[in-house]
Image (cartoon, rainbow, N blue to C red):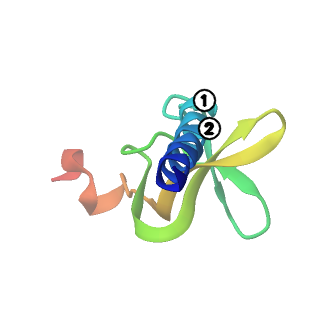
Amino acid sequence: MKKIKLIIMTLAILLSIGGAFATRPHYDCTFSTQYYWTGSGYMPAGQFGVNFACLQSANSCSYVLVSGQYVQCRVGTYTPINLTGDAHPKNK
């Protein structure tokens, strides 16, 4: 009887944890204006893949403004993409 009670309690706990993750709000920041941290404030980052990229790391790469607070959008190291000079395809 104690084994059955233990199994039922374990399932109840696992289902409640799974339900908490399933019902938490998800925010898609893909099409929102993204910002990066300069060390003293937030600046517009531009469009991901066009103006900046996020190199693999555990840092916060870009943020979005949600209800007056900056919230992490992407993980990585913020890296601007150089579209001027010799690297630009039109200049070759």
Counting from the top left corner in percent of width and height, residue 88 is at 26, 52
Q: Residues within 10 Å of mark 2 (few under 14, many from 20)?
A: few
Residue drawn at the location 53% of the way across and 50% of the way down: 10
The amino acid on which the numbered mark 2 sits, given as a three-letter code, is Ala
Residue drawn at the location 57% of the way across and 40% of the way down: 12
Does the CB distance between marks 1 and 2 fall below 8 Å? yes
Callout 2 secondary element: helix
Counting from the top left corner in percent of width and height, residue 59 is at 55, 68
Asked where in the image residue 85 lies, by quadrant, the reply is bottom left
Counting from the top left corner in percent of width and height, residue 33 is at 61, 35
In this rendering, the answer to whether 25 lies above or below 4 is above
Viewer-nearest residue: 79 or 86: 79
Residue drawn at the location 79% of the way across and 67% of the way down: 40
Residue drawn at the location 44% of the way across and 71% of the way down: 57
The amino acid on which the numbered mark 1 sits, given as a three-letter code, is Thr
Q: Which residue is mark 1?
A: 23
In this rendering, the answer to whether 56 lies above or below 47 is below
Report, in whole angstroms, how far the alpha carbon at label 1 lies from the one at label 2: 5 Å
Q: How many numbered circles does the render carry?
A: 2
Callout 1 secondary element: helix
Q: Which residue is mark 2?
A: 20
Quick one: which residue is furthest to the front in this view? 1
Direction from residue 30 to residue 13 in the image, left or right: right
Viewer-nearest residue: 44 or 1: 1
Q: Residues within 10 Å of mark 1 (few under 14, many from 20)?
A: few
